Image (spheres, helix red, strand yellow):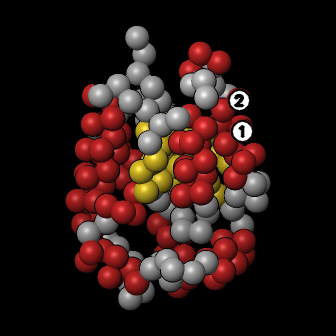
């Protein structure tokens, strides 16, 4: 028996990670985990105040996400997680939970990302940190089991592309 897939929908703030991840999880009939929900209060306060997180700030958060991924894998359950996963080293930590993790990298034009961030309400991440995230971003490379999607596409189209790339036996009947 093969284990259900575990996906990390990744990219900078404003790319639509949460929207795509929630829709994909619903389509697959698996849990969705909003990665930001596991940030310690200190990290949220730093970002809300306009300070970029350091690798050290992110370490415990990434380890907590890897533990959730590992729990899903050990339980034989699928999972869709939203997480910026900006650097390969961060993705390597996440892969400690499941080496065959699938990454869905959402990327887009900076002006589109800025417009999305400016339009959203109730999120702690200020627009001022987008530049920092873009400069930190290491695009997934060879051997990282990553697919790339332009965020100018509607989330439904991105999800449909992911589903179309899977074999029919991997999809859950709804």
Q: Residues within 10 Å of mark 1 (few under 14, many from 20)?
A: some
Front one among 125 and 32: 32
**Disc marking residue 164:** 2
Question: Do the CB atoms of the residues marked 2 and 1 lie less than 8 Å apart?
Answer: yes
What residue is drawn where x is 67% and y is 28%? Answer: 165
Give the image quarter of residue 49: bottom left
What residue is drawn where x is 69% and y is 52%? Answer: 155
Q: Where's the N terminus, which quadrant?
A: top left
Q: Residues within 10 Å of mark 2 (few under 14, many from 20)?
A: few
Give the image quarter of residue 54: bottom left
Looking at this view, name the residue that lies furthest to the top: 1
Going by the image, does 124 lie left or right of 69? right
Residue 141 in view (yes/no): no
Residue 154 in view (yes/no): yes
| Relative vertical location of residue 138 with respect to residue 121 in this rendering, above or below | above
Could you tell me which secondary element the residue under label 1 belongs to?
helix
Q: Position of residue 77 (x, y in %)?
A: 38, 30
Give the image quarter of residue 71: top left
Q: Position of residue 150 (x, y in %)?
A: 71, 54
The Cα atoms of the two marked residues, 2 and 1, are separated by 6 Å
Q: Where's the C terminus, which quadrant?
A: top right
Front one among 29 and 21: 29
Front one among 61 and 29: 29
What residue is drawn where x is 69% and y is 62%? Answer: 108
What residue is drawn where x is 71% and y is 37%? Answer: 161
The residue under label 1 is: 160
Could you tell me which secondary element the residue under label 2 belongs to?
helix
């Amino acid at each position: 028996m093969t284990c259900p897939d575990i996906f990390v929908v990744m990219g900078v703030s404003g790319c639509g990670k949460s929207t795509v991840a929630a829709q994909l999880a619903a389509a697959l009939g698996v849990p969705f985990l909003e990665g930001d929900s596991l940030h310690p209060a200190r990290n949220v306060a730093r970002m809300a105040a306009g300070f970029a997180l350091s690798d050290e700030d992110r370490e415990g958060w990434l380890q907590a996400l890897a533990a959730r991924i590992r729990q899903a894998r050990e339980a034989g359950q699928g999972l869709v997680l939203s997480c910026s996963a900006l650097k390969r080293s961060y993705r390597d930590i996440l892969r400690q939970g499941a080496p065959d993790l699938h990454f869905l990298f959402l990327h887009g034009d900076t002006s589109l990302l800025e417009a999305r961030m400016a339009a959203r309400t109730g999120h702690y991440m200020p627009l001022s940190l987008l530049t920092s995230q873009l400069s930190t971003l290491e695009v997934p490379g060879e051997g990282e089991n990553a697919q790339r999607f332009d965020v100018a596409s509607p989330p439904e189209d991105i999800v449909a592309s992911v589903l179309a790339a899977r074999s029919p036996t991997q999809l859950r009947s709804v």
